[in-house]
Image (tube, rainbow, N blue to C red):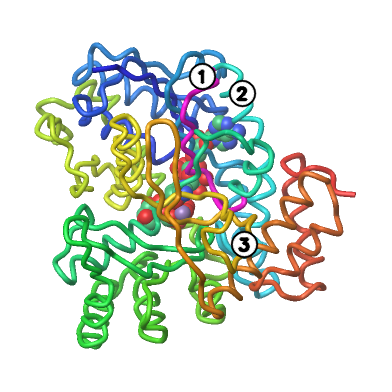
Amino acid sequence: MKKYSVAICGGGSTYTPDMMELLCMMQKDFPLKKLVLYDIDKNRQEIVGKFGEVMFKEYYPELEYSYTLDPKEAFDGIDFAFVQIRAGGMDQRNNDEKIPYEFNCIGQETCGPGGLSYGVRSVVQMIDLIKDIRTYSKDAWIINYSNPAAIVAEATKRIFPYDKKLVNICDMPTSVLDAYLPLINVKRSQIYPKYFGLNHLGWFTGLYDKETGHDYLPDLLQYVESHYEQIHEQFENKIKGKDDHWGITFLNHLEMLHDFPYSLPNTYNLYYIYPNKSLTHYSLEHTRYDEVINGREKMVFEYCKKITELGRMKGTEYDISSKINPNYAVDNPQAAATVYADNDVHAAYLVELVLSIINNSNDIALVMTKNNGICPNLDNEMMLEVACRIGKEEIVPLNYGTVPAFEKGLLENQFACEKLLVDAILEKNSLKLLQAFTENRIVRDAELAKKLIQRFIDVNGEYWPQFK
Ligand SMILES: NC(=O)c1ccc[n+]([C@@H]2O[C@H](COP(=O)([O-])OP(=O)(O)OC[C@H]3O[C@@H](n4cnc5c(N)ncnc54)[C@H](O)[C@@H]3O)[C@@H](O)[C@H]2O)c1
Ligand SMILES: O=P(O)(O)OC[C@H]1O[C@H](O[C@H]2[C@H](O)[C@@H](O)[C@@H](O)O[C@@H]2CO)[C@H](O)[C@@H](O)[C@@H]1O
Ligand SMILES: [Mn+2]
């Protein structure tokens, strides 16, 4: 079987250790010749890089493993680039989330004004990164997680329109399925989805059994409705006394599903449909940034440093020998190392796509692709998150059909915002920047938009182009 060469961009990402452990477990299903981490922050990447040296020496000694800041060293002769960079790092995420709260507006990583600020930085850096990868590996698959994925997808559609092996993905829909399918005893590996939307604003409208074609979605919606109080209490008890971002999110999601019980929404829809409730989830003093920097980031880096200090994993509580199995079960997200329990779906979803590519199994998965009539009553230029067949040489979308007025209205508004932002970035056009912020359903007001833009210009410095 061919051995593949992989680069992980954002080697210092908190998701990279999980991804490396999963690649370690997958060595028979997805054998690697070379794995290289690439980052722009030497110290940050070194924490993860050194962990990888310990792990691969024990479980994957034949793997050519390294970490680097040099694009040529990272991207020369690769088959895959897994991209998970955070343009501007967590410091800028803090600004993205806190500055809107100065004006009593929702501050969020990828949605609303925070997402627009992040989007400007990401578009600039992702275009440069993809050009670097393509300089050294013309034919590698580039699978991007970097956010805000909707805005990155809109930009890469324009700059790399013919790049068939450049795909933007998101793990949120998978997480929604992992939260709800167990309620009706259905495994994610049993079904393929029908879904439509932009990234972080979408809806499941079908969950089809791969063998029988049965649609489980009506069963699920009916079950949730008939057991609503019980499930609500279950979700409530799970978060009692805890600062559980995702627990609170899924409780609010359940209430949104109860209000609109005809499809299964993405959790991010909450920011656009319940802005007042979403606003009070955080404050100027405390946003998701504070939880991540003191939670996942702290936990993951402590894990890496601990193993580096131990110099081994075998025979310790960190031993993953039992998980290195020849038959990776897509339905076993726990197969991903539980470096940080919440992360398991992130690595698992990416690997599921990779398996479909290398085996040309044309599995159906959600990725972002140009509309072009998939949803005939939505703008053809939209980068829709829809079900596609994932093949060795290209990704082929399934047709969807027309979408209802309520969802169409939300999507066309959000698309206008994201399109105008990418226009603004590529043209350095300050009027289009103002239009993008004002168009956004969470900002809405031009006076507020002007204040937000000025504050983001101040804090982003050279991360943002000079808008004229
Ligand atoms: N699409 C999804 O559903 C999804 C899911 C999870 C995370 N993400 C995204 O994945 C990214 C990583 O998340 P995280 O929390 O681990 O971030 P993180 O801040 O922990 O790590 C990001 C890494 O990227 C590096 N980096 C920044 N700019 C870079 C550049 N231009 N080139 C190379 N490296 C660069 C940083 O130095 C850092 O080491 C973020 O964009 C996050 O929003 C997306
Ligand atoms: O606030 P964060 O940094 O913990 O997570 C933001 C991301 O949330 C979604 O992804 C995953 C998340 O990465 C994972 O840790 C877990 O919490 O479940 C989430 C849903 O799978 C979202 O899809 C990403 O775009 C966000 O960046
Ligand atoms: Mn996402």
Side of 185 relative to 253 (left or right)? left
Per the model, the C-alpha gap separating discs 2 and 1 is 8 Å
Q: Residues within 10 Å of mark 3 (few under 14, many from 20)?
A: many
Residue stretch rendered in magenta on the structure: 137-151
Task: Return the mark for residue 132.
Answer: 2
In terms of secondary structure, where does tag 3 sit? Answer: helix
Per the model, the C-alpha gap separating discs 1 and 3 is 36 Å
- Seen at 53% across and 35% down, the residue is 164
Marks 2 and 3, the one that precedes in the sequence: 3
Q: Which residue carries the number 3 mark?
A: 98
In terms of secondary structure, where does tag 2 sit? Answer: helix
- Seen at 41% across and 49% down, the residue is 388
Marks 2 and 1, the one that precedes in the sequence: 1
Residue 116 in percent (x, y) is at 66, 57
Q: Nearer the viewer, mark 1 or mark 3?
A: 1
Marks 1 and 3, the one that precedes in the sequence: 1
Residue 270 in percent (x, y) is at 48, 73
